[in-house]
Image (cartoon, rainbow, N blue to C red):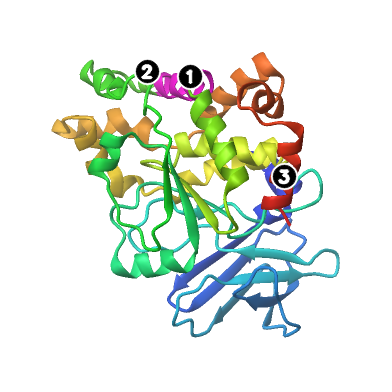
């Protein structure tokens, strides 16, 4: 469970935008939110809102329905007597057939800027995108996909993405030192605690043995054009989650909020839908339902997973920015360029 401190550190963590039905949008604010009572404006462009107020958040709730035949993403500008304006949007991007697809926009940085909406996305595999999902994906204007899967994983989870994005393959082992790390572990019939510790070790392995891949990630972000960038892997949780965590901290997002974003995979990764795929992927028998119990720590999202990586970084480098400078080749000028490019 993420600490409630994230809500105090960044008001955007206290707001949830959702679409409970086609054409309907709902905003719910926690009682502690500065926007528990607020005006609402709407736009298809997060940087441009007209003066028309479409409604009010009252007692933390707002709902509206309107036609959106092109299924374009909608952004909401909130303003209250004490705060604002604050631009928010649905965190999970609704692409039919996608896995754990999210926009990391809106988070507050130490400089007072916010991560730009529609610039950096994160997801799991997109091999099940439907025709409607592909239309919605095309509307996002993703120009680059940074794929952390191995080629053999990609072959089994291949997707034809519209718009011919530049796909950059930065393959990272889905385990410690071997593509079959978890295959071998599951063959030993491990206990839950063994699989959890294997996840911790895998997260530390991302730090110690994948410097080239994550260094290339930053170079790709620095040299991408103005189109959106998608980071993805198989589930969009660990390899992608760690990459996103590095980017957010280097952009100045507080650790509590970075953990909050990581833990959203607990909400948006469809565990039940992915069980059969993961059982097949790792060759785990589900006789008497035991296989599901064994693989569950792999499917779950735990704060301790990301903390395992951060604890290693903090112990040996002091902080994430120091790690990025010493190991990933991100210089002082690069930090400034990243902030200018990916925050508003």
Disc on the earlier residue, 1 or 2: 2
Question: Mark 2 or mark 3, which is nearer to you?
Answer: 3
Q: Position of residue 309 (x, y in %)?
A: 56, 24
Q: Which residue is mark 3?
A: 337
Crowding at dot 3, Cα within 10 Å, few <14 / some 14-19 / many 20+, comes out as some
Magenta segment: 196-208
Task: Name the main secondary structure of what is drawn in magenta.
Answer: helix
Q: Earlier in the sequence, mark 2 or mark 3?
A: 2
Q: Are discs 1 and 2 less than 8 Å apart at CB? A: yes
State left or right for residue 39 relative to residue 3.
right
* 66 in relation to 43, above or below: below
* Residue at the disc numbered 2: 177
Q: Residue at x 35, y 45 (%)?
A: 271
| Residue plotted at (58% across, 44% down) | 221
The C terminus - image quarter:
bottom right
Labelled disc at residue 59: none
Depth order, front residue of 175/150: 150
The residues bearing labels 3 and 1 have C-alpha atoms spaced at a distance of 26 Å
Residue behind mark 1: 209
Relative to 245, 171 lies left or right: left
Give the mark nearer the N terminus: 3 vs 1. 1
């Amino acid at each position: 469970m993420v600490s409630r401190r994230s809500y105090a550190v960044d008001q955007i963590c206290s707001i949830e935008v959702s679409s409970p039905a086609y054409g309907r949008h709902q905003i719910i604010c926690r009682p502690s939110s500065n926007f528990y009572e607020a005006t609402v404006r709407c736009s298809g462009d997060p940087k441009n809102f007209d003066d028309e107020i479409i409604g009010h958040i009252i007692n933390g709730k707002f709902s509206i329905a309107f036609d959106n035949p092109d299924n374009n993403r909608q952004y909401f500008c909130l303003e209250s007597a004490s705060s604002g304006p604050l631009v928010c949007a649905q965190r999970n991007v609704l692409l039919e057939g996608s896995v754990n697809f999210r926009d990391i926009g809106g988070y507050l940085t130490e400089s007072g800027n916010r991560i730009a909406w529609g610039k950096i996305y994160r997801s799991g595999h997109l091999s099940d995108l439907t025709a409607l999902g592909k239309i919605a994906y095309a509307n996002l204007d993703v120009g680059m996909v940074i794929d952390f899967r191995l080629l053999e994983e990609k072959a089994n989870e291949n997707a034809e993405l519209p718009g011919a994005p530049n796909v950059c393959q930065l393959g990272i082992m889905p385990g410690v030192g071997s593509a079959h790390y978890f295959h071998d572990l599951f063959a030993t019939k491990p206990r839950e605690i063994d699989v959890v510790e294997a996840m911790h070790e895998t997260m530390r392995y991302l730090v110690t043995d994948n410097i080239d891949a994550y260094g290339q990630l930053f170079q790709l972000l620095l040299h991408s054009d103005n189109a959106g960038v998608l980071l993805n892997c198989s589930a969009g949780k660990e390899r992608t989650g760690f990459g996103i965590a590095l980017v957010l901290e280097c952009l100045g997002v507080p650790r509590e909020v970075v953990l909050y974003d990581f833990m959203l995979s607990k909400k948006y990764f469809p565990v039940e839908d992915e069980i059969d795929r993961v059982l097949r992927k790792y060759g785990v028998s589900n006789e008497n339902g035991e296989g599901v119990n064994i693989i569950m720590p792999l499917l779950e999202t735990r704060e301790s997973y990301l903390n395992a990586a951060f604890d290693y970084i903090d112990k040996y480098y002091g902080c994430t920015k120091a790690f990025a400078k010493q190991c990933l080749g991100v210089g002082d000028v690069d930090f400034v360029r990243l902030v200018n490019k990916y925050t508003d």
